[in-house]
Amino acid sequence: MYTLKRSLGQHFLKDENIILRIISALKEDPFLNLLEVGPGGGALTKHLVQLPGINFKAVELDSEKVEYLEKKYQKLDNKIIHKNFLDIEKPFEDAFTVIGNFPYNISTQILFKILEWKDDVPVVIGMFQKEVALRAASPPGSKVYGVLSALIQPYYDIEYLFDVPPGSFDPPPKVISGVIRLRKKKNKLNMKSERAYWVLVKTAFNQRRKTLRNAVKSLFDPEVLKDEFFNKRAEVLSIEDFAALTYKMK
């Protein structure tokens, strides 16, 4: 068997109904290559390794869990990347889907890591702390719309699928969890450059209570800032608004 390590944020899924709902959501999109992040005790893995015709890999930091999984599932021989997900190289040459009950202490970083591979990752099915899941999926004007929302949504359509209660895990976390699905957008958002867009979004939300005029004044010439548009606050701007503004930056 194995032990649970709170230092790694381990809360292992045990609710078979929830597990099957996640697997069902995964099957709605075609894929040949699949990466599971943080398989832990194998709650999802036991179903994933049985998918026919799939090239499967998993990334797991915990040595004990790696040993446990390799002993329990022969199909995982040479299929587990024993590293921190944030440190790995792109695991497949071709496009691949990502799935996982993501460690909550690095879940936002995981999404940003996936963005580095966005051209090769058409679909992500992930479990997060509900607060993070809602932030990723929220539209402009929402109380939780922010940096995470505005940086991921140019590339992915995000769907909040369902809640997962604490009792579905061992040990139960102190928060409700949520499963979201990211699907790669077909059309790219028209922006001056990705760097300009990221700088603008991060600067705008860094002082989200201020008007844009005060929050992003370092990025625009004074004449541009006279536009009434800059009376708005970052939380009401759509990703299209931010993208259009990049063309007016210094």
Image (spheres, rainbow, N blue to C red):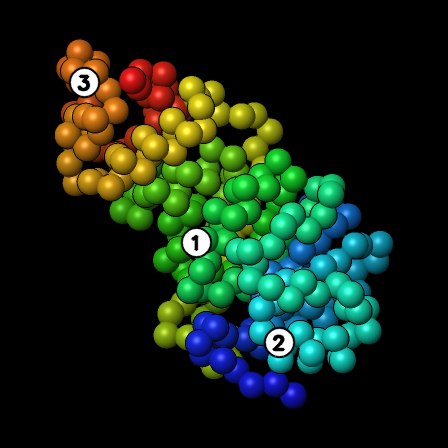
Residue in front for this viewpoint, 249 or 49: 249
For the question of whether residue 22 can be seen, the reply is: no
Instruction: Give residue 40's mark.
Output: none
The residue located at (40%, 52%) in the rendering is 134
Answer above or below: position of 184 versus 168: above
Three-letter amino acid code at the position of disc 3: Leu
| Mark 2 secondary-structure assignment | helix
Q: How far separated are the C-alphas under marks 1 and 2? A: 23 Å
Q: Residues within 10 Å of mark 3 (few under 14, many from 20)?
A: some
How far separated are the C-alphas under marks 1 and 3? 32 Å
Q: Which mark is residue 63?
A: 2
Disc 3, SS: helix
Q: What residue is drawn where x is 47% and y is 33%?
A: 154
Q: At 42% across and 64% down in the image, what residue appears?
A: 105
Please name the amino acid that badge 1 sits on. Thr
Task: Name the residue carrying label 1.
Answer: 108
Name the image quarter holding the N terminus: bottom right
- Residue on which disc 3 sits: 225
Image quadrant in which the C terminus is located:
top left
- Dot 1 falls on a residue whose secondary structure is helix
